[in-house]
């Protein structure tokens, strides 16, 4: 297991996630691919600041994992509170987010801190912040700038110390241009921006993630641990992964259940073209070379010059 992991700590686990109904993919973060390792450096830099953070990435890439890592490395003693903006009630969204005072609603015999209050001293993670109603975006920005929230029905604001990490699978700059997102809130969030590449853009993470999922599912289901065969590994690396990490987890889970021996074959992956004959080694090499950036190409050329290749 994990034979693809380099030295150091490329696999970060989140044991606290066991306390909530998160999937396996929401309990570990892998930094193996060069792009991922550079991203980890940016995460460490931003975590040490008080800047708000905006994570941009496709659905299923693991944006919440980055948010959790930022919170963990920030040293903040409060809770990590995750909120899906698309799941906020259209009617009660303001009270859900900022809380409400006693008697604010019929039958409300006690006050509520709201998600903002629950994250006091910690980190508030707003997933798909583009789905936050426009009317609440201005109130959110005011709360972040003044470090105070005015609960629904309250006469006086409540001081709060909240670090905001937001995420979006859409380009918020385009949403601003379309008049669907607050420009001031966007500028506030854009101070600390992180781009989380799609899984197809960080191929070095694919096999380590696949082996991690395989090991966890085998242990959870009480099954013997098979290995990915060479052709299955190539099939995993060549797949475009439109569903990103979420899709990879599902594929590995399926392969474990249908594999009858100690080796996972391409046919077990149920991927388009995965059962085809072995791929030409030259084609694989060309694909890997095409993924290198200018700095990595220069390093490879220097290494080849040293070896006389």
Image (cartoon, rainbow, N blue to C red):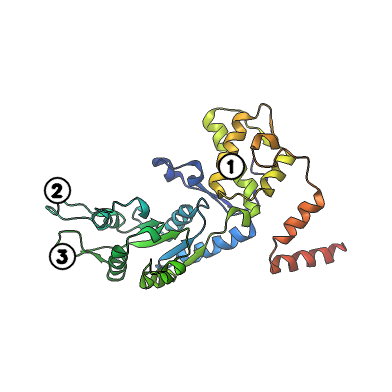
Which residue does the image show at 63% across and 32% down from the upper left?
225
Q: Earlier in the sequence, mark 3 or mark 2?
A: 2
The kind of secondary structure element at disc 2 is loop
Count every numbered label the image shows and give the total: 3
Please determine whether, in this image, residue 138 is positioned above or below residue 102.
below
Residue 301 position, x and y percent, is 79, 66
Residue 15 position, x and y percent, is 45, 44
Residue underneath mark 1: 212
Q: Nearest the camera: 183 or 178? A: 178
- For the N terminus, which image quadrant? top right
Which residue does the image show at 21% across and 63% down from the upper left?
150
Residue underneath mark 3: 156
- For the C terminus, which image quadrant? bottom right
Residue 152 position, x and y percent, is 19, 59
Q: CA distance from mark 3 to mark 2?
A: 18 Å
Is residue 169 at least partly visible in the picture?
yes
Residue underneath mark 2: 108
Q: CA distance from mark 2 to mark 1?
A: 46 Å
């Amino acid at each position: 297991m994990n034979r693809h992991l380099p030295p150091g700590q490329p696999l970060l686990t989140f044991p606290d996630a066991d306390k909530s109904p998160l999937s396996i993919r929401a309990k570990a973060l892998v930094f193996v691919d060069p792009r991922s390792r550079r991203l980890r450096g940016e995460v460490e830099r931003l975590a040490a600041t008080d800047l708000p953070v905006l994570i941009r990435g496709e659905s299923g890439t693991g944006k919440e994992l980055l948010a959790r890592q930022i919170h963990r490395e920030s040293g903040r003693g409060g809770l990590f509170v995750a909120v899906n903006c698309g799941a906020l009630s259209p009617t009660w969204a303001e009270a859900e987010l900022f809380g409400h005072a006693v008697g604010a609603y019929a039958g409300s015999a006690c006050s509520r801190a709201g998600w903002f209050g629950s994250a006091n001293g910690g980190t508030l993670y707003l997933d798909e912040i583009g789905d936050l109603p426009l009317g609440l975006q201005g109130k959110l920005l005011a709360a972040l700038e003044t470090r105070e929230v005015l609960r629904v029905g309250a006469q006086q604001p409540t001081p709060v110390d909240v670090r905001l990490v937001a995420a979006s699978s859409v380009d918020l700059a385009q949403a601003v241009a379309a008049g669907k997102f607050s420009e001031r809130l966007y500028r506030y969030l854009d101070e600390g921006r992180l781009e989380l590449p799609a899984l197809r853009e960080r191929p070095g993470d694919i096999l380590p993630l696949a082996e991690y999922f395989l090991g966890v599912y085998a242990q959870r289901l009480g099954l013997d641990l098979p290995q990915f065969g060479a052709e299955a590994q190539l099939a995993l690396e060549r797949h475009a992964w439109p569903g990103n990490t979420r899709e990879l987890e599902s594929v590995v889970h399926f392969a474990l259940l249908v594999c009858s021996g100690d080796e996972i074959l391409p046919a077990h992956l149920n991927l388009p073209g995965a059962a085809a004959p072995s791929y030409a080694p030259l084609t694989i090499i060309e694909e890997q070379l095409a993924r290198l950036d200018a700095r990595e190409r220069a390093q490879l050329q220097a290494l080849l010059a040293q070896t006389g290749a």
